[in-house]
Amino acid sequence: MKPTRVKEPTVLVIFGATGDLTRRKLMPALFDLFRQQLLPKLIRVIGFSRRPLSQSAFREMMKKAVSPKEGWDGFAKILHYHQGTFEDSSGYKKLAARIGKADRDWKGCINALFYLATPPTFYKQILEHLASSGLMEACSPQEGWTRILVEKPFGKDLASAQKLDRKLGELFREEQIFRIDHFLGKETIQNIMAFRFGNPIFEPIWNRTYVERVEVRLLETLGIEGRGAFYDGIGALRDVGQNHLLQMVALTAMEPPASFEPEAVRNERVKVFQSIRCIEPSDVGRYTVRGQHSGYTDEEGVSSRSHTETYFRIKFFINNTRWEDVPFFLESGKRLDRDLTEVSVFFHEIAHHLFPHQPKQFEQNILRLRIQPDEAISLRLLVKRPGIAMQLDPQELRFDYRSSFEERFVEAYEKVLLDCIAGDQTIFARSDGIEASWEFITKIIHGWQKDGAPLHVYEPGSSGPKAKDTLA
Ligand code: BG6
């Protein structure tokens, strides 16, 4: 089913238009949406950045970011460049005049969407200028809307996330604020809810009585890919733990929402974060393992004495009736031996061993929701091996996404942009959820800062520091 195309004229302003995120994710997503005729019929995409660039130089730069290029000329016509510095109000005033002109050209009231794709250090300035220049005001209360899209990282810890949220709350209404976690836009992440709440056979066993433990992993072979200056002050836990991994936990552990309305779904996700039992800084040695791959400190932009983690494994619990005492594990790392993003649910072993030749190490049924790279759902079962003897063997029941459907996958950023244009906040993070997740993560970071858990060095291409095996 094709989503309804927004009819009202719309302007999308991207702050940080010459940056990495715009080139790698936003332009390809916008171009694809354009080619599928899913963007509003009347739309202008305005790139706002410091660099002095002509319109055509900007278009050429963006063209390099997409492939294939068929249909580019039509798309290029909606692309515009606006030079301005984030700290100087004149750039915003000129932008307001430009958007006002679009109002007049299109003889109507336009919608305006502002995307913060800059380093977070610029957020405060941009937000204040957006508010003071009147750019965030719709042309009338009845017509047109203005929205703001905020990229992660949403703060560096609990205090800075609260500060950013206070700033947003002072300037904008909650329904205008779209806090992005692009993982929630991924097909296979959305499928976690479809799988859990569309198939009633799993609900009775989705709890502490049947589940022994849950593992949520995001393992990457890539390193920091030239992002040293950003990553070194952040580390793996803030980069993907506070957001992507915890959102996967939320979808796996949440209660069924009363409806598929955005607030009903967001309420249940947030309740999971609020039920996580925090790990006190003094306990990080017991519940966490952190590592840094060798060679990390030689990367450009990274301090030679850096203590930033590129790997972590964390064991924690969720305090509620469904999950009390079931360990959840979060694991992620750069430069590991494989690419894998997955939620694995391990069920309790059988209570009574009936078969003499049952392989002990494979006794658990394991349900794997593979997010990437090979999107699938599989269930490990024991079956009888052909032969005279009653010998059991582990095999997999498997559903493979790509071979089961012909439709193309919608890229996460396409979904993020379209849902924001449609005003649907389901896949966006909410401030109370962000606060609860930062509370959990900040305590761990404090424990690490006090050297509560050693920083283990691991070899690139390995499965991570050996110490991770002690955290079971
Ligand atoms: C980003 C992180 O948010 O997510 C990266 O900053 C990480 O470090 C990436 O590699 C993973 O997302 P995806 O969609 O590329 O799997």
Image (tube, rainbow, N blue to C red):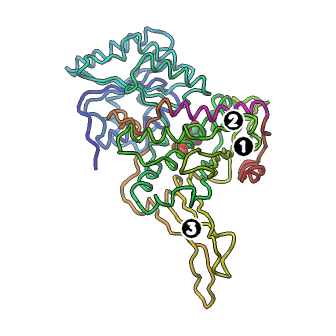
Sequence order check, earlier mark of 2 and 1: 1
Sequence order check, earlier mark of 2 and 3: 3
Q: Which residue is mark 2?
A: 444
Q: Which residue is mark 1?
A: 288
- Label 3 CA crowd tier, 10 Å (few <14, some 14–19, many 20+): some
Residue sitting at the far front: 321
- Taking the image as shown, residue 120 lies to the left or right of residue 280, namely left
Which label sits on residue 380? 3
The answer to if 450 sits in the magenta stretch is yes
In the image, is the residue at mark 2 within 8 Å of ligand 1 by its beta carbon? Answer: no
Q: Position of residue 299 (x, y in %)?
A: 71, 35
Above or below for 98 versus 6:
above
Main SS, magenta residues: helix
Depth order, front residue of 71/212:
212
Q: Which residues are magenta?
A: 433-451
Residue sitting at the far bottom: 388
Q: CA distance from mark 2 to mark 3?
A: 33 Å
Q: Position of residue 130 (x, y in %)?
A: 42, 15
Q: Quadrant of residue 29?
A: top left
- Taking the image as shown, residue 217 lies to the left or right of residue 300, namely left
Sequence order check, earlier mark of 3 and 1: 1
Q: Position of residue 229 (x, y in %)?
A: 65, 28
Contact (Cβ within 8 Å) of mark 2 with mark 1: yes
Q: Position of residue 416 (x, y in %)?
A: 41, 37
Q: CA distance from mark 3 to mark 1?
A: 28 Å
Q: Quadrant of residue 396?
A: bottom right
